[in-house]
Structures are given as structure tokens and as C-alpha cells.
Image (spheres, rainbow, N blue to C red):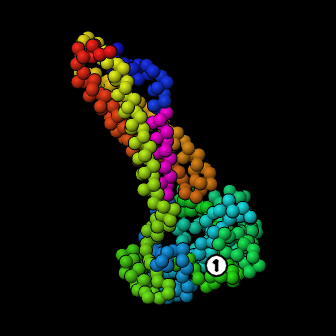
Amino acid sequence: MNDLYLIWMNLFRKPLRTVLLIVSIFIAFLIFGLLVGVNVALNRATETGSASNRMVVANKINFTEPLPIAYLNRVSAIPGVVGATHQSWFGAFFRDSAQSRFVGFAVEPESYTAIFADQIKLGPGEREAFIRERTGVIVGRSLANQYGWQVGQTLPISSDIYFRPDGSRSWDMKVVGIFDGAKPTDPTNALYFNYDYLNETRPFGRDTVGTITVLTASPDINDQVAKAIDATFANSPFETSTVDEKTFSRAFLKQAGDLNFIITMVVAAAFAAILMIVGTTLVSAVRERTKEIGVMKTLGFPGHRVLRMVLGESLLLSGLGGLLGLGVAAVALNGLSRSPIGETFGALSMTAPVAAAGMGLALLLGLVTGLAPALSALRMNIIDALGRR
């Protein structure tokens, strides 16, 4: 009879209690796997397609505040800038359903598709059609598949920000191209349309843009160019803040809150609760087996072997719960990856580092919760153990 068999039998001597403990640990690691998996996907999305020599110029107050479109020519003239374009958030949704929101930008077709050529892969003739067609729109592959859109189709795209002079919030747009990302995992859930079409039909905010993207001659001069741009518009009614594309993407995501902090707090709270539950239950379980431990020591079981067995129960318990939780989280993330959520964030999956970190936490949880009862069993005196009622 080996120790592993004894550990297994002791752990499941009260099946209901053990199953409830495993379920508690399972829930904690399911939360961990899902939240960290989504967070990794979000961080990866900020890195995807980001060119090291692309920078974003936004209003210094907040990137939700506009900039005059006249800034574009002044930015383009700054030494070190080899290209510039602009984009304006549209707050897009399809037809009259505000529940079907997606990423939509009003852009200048020629310069935008040139600067973001590494992210927007169009078919033959589609870029030329986008430049030529005033009401043209290009849509991402996943967004087109979600709604069944085809090239040549006219769509009523609505905005939760802008409205037309007649009060309508809908613009008719003709699909002139469907684009893919640089890699199969790149998100393609956005659409882009002609800024002039929006600008000439909106009653407010005319001749302003959301942000300006600049392409520098080399990443080595990014800081120099950023300082020159911000100095150009210093003390103006629309001061600017220029940062690299990755930094801007992270700031954009943080508008929903500091996700890393939120995830850390949620996971910490879950693990603190599980730590108390499992630790208290294991201490009680060892106390229930006081006489049994005394008998084992009387039969010649050394103290270190008893310690190893009690600690093994805790490690096996947390390992089973952690493995199940991470496994179900991996399946759930894979399923979400095929949903509109996955199309927004890109491929969702349980990465190897997240799985390794999860199992490491499971082992740490087992050690922390099992150490006190294991040491208690180690120090237990045979006479006291057999005499305890």
C-alpha cells in the first residue's frame, strides 16, 4: 500500500466534503483562467499590427476631444514625418439596433490605407474603389461574415454620436471592399468610410477629427518628432499629446478602467476566500483523524511520512480543482474566440504561460493551506493523540 493510495483514500473518505472543496477551487481557477485569458488577448491586441514608427496625435485634454483637421497639414510639414492621416470614431451600429455596436472610423481613404497597409489587406481594385467612391466603406472579414455583408451591398450604418440635419442617425454606405488582417489572428471587426461623407452631412463638429496618425522616418526619432509636434501646438486652444501607437492603444483600453488592477483584485479576492475555506476544512479534517494519526505513528509511520501524506492531500485537492478550472476556462475561451467577443479582441485562448501560472498558483494554494495541518500532524504526540476524545 503506497502513500499515493493512502492520500487518495483519505482525501475521499468524505466524498461530499471533498467534492464541495474541489468545486470551490474549480470556480476560483475558472475565474482566473477566463479573466487572465481575456486580459492577455487585450494586451496582445494593443501589440498587433503596431508599427514602431507610427505615432498618434491626440487632444492633450483627452483623446475623446477633437482636433482641427487643419492640424494635419502642419503635422505633415514637421521634419521627420513621412506620412500623416486622420481618423474619427463614429460610434457605429447596424440598422436601428444599438446592441449591434462595432468599431467604425471616418478616415481619409488614400492616406489611411497607405499608412495602415500592414493591417488592412484589400483585394485587387478595392483600395482604388474606396478612394474613388465617396459613400464607399470597407469592412473587416469577421464583421462582414457576422452580418452576411457582400461587396456591392448598400448598408444603413448608424451612429450613436452623430446625426444628420434631418435628425436621422443613419448613413447609407456602399461596401467596396472586405479586408483581412496581416495575420489570421488579427481582429477584423471594424469598418472604415470616407471622412468627407460624414463631414459634409453632420451639423456639428465639422472640420474636426478625432486623432492624427503620423509615420516617422525612423523609430529612433519618435521622441524628437513627438516633442516637435506638441511644441507646435503649445498654448493653442487645441494642445496636443503625441505618443507611440502601442502606448495610445493601451490608454484607449484603460478608458474602461485599469483592467490589470481589476483582474488582480477579483482573482485575489477569490483566492483569499478559497484559502480560508480550504485551510479551515483541512485543519478540521486532521483533528478528526487525531487517533488515526496516533495509531499510524504507533505502527511505525515516521513523522515526516505523516507530514508528507497530509500535505499531499492538500496538494492533490488544489491540483484537481485547479486543473479542472483551467481546463474548463480553456474550453470557454476557445468558444468565445468564435463569438463576436472573440472577433473584437482577436483569438482568445489559454496560453501556455497562463496555464503554467495557474498550475503554479494551484500548487502554492495546496502548500499554504496544507502546511499548518501537516505540521500539526508531524508534531502530534502518540499519547496525546490516542488519549484525545
Residue lying at 36% horizontally and 37% vertically, measured from the top left? 365
In the displayed orientation, state which residue is furthest to the front: 389
Residue 128 lies, in percent from the top left, at 65, 76
Determine if residue 316 is in view.
no
Residue 299 in which image quadrant? top left
Say which of 294 and 204 sits in front. Answer: 294
Give the residue type that dot 1 points to.
Tyr
Would you call the spot at circle 1 few (<14 residues within 10 Å), some (14-19), or many (20 or more)? many
Residue lying at 45% horizontally and 26% vertically, measured from the top left? 18
- Taken as a whole, is the magenta stretch helix, strand or loop? helix
Q: Does residue 309 sit above or below 230 in this rendering?
A: above
Say which of 181 and 200 sits in front. Answer: 200
Circle 1: element type: helix
Residue 288 lies, in percent from the top left, at 36, 20
Label 1 sits on residue: 195
Determine if residue 287 is in view.
yes
Stretch in magenta: 23-42
Residue lying at 32% horizontally and 23% vertically, measured from the top left? 309
Residue lying at 46% horizontally and 41% vertically, measured from the top left? 28
Residue 204: within the magenta?
no
| Image quarter in which the C terminus is found | top left
Residue 84 lies, in percent from the top left, at 51, 80
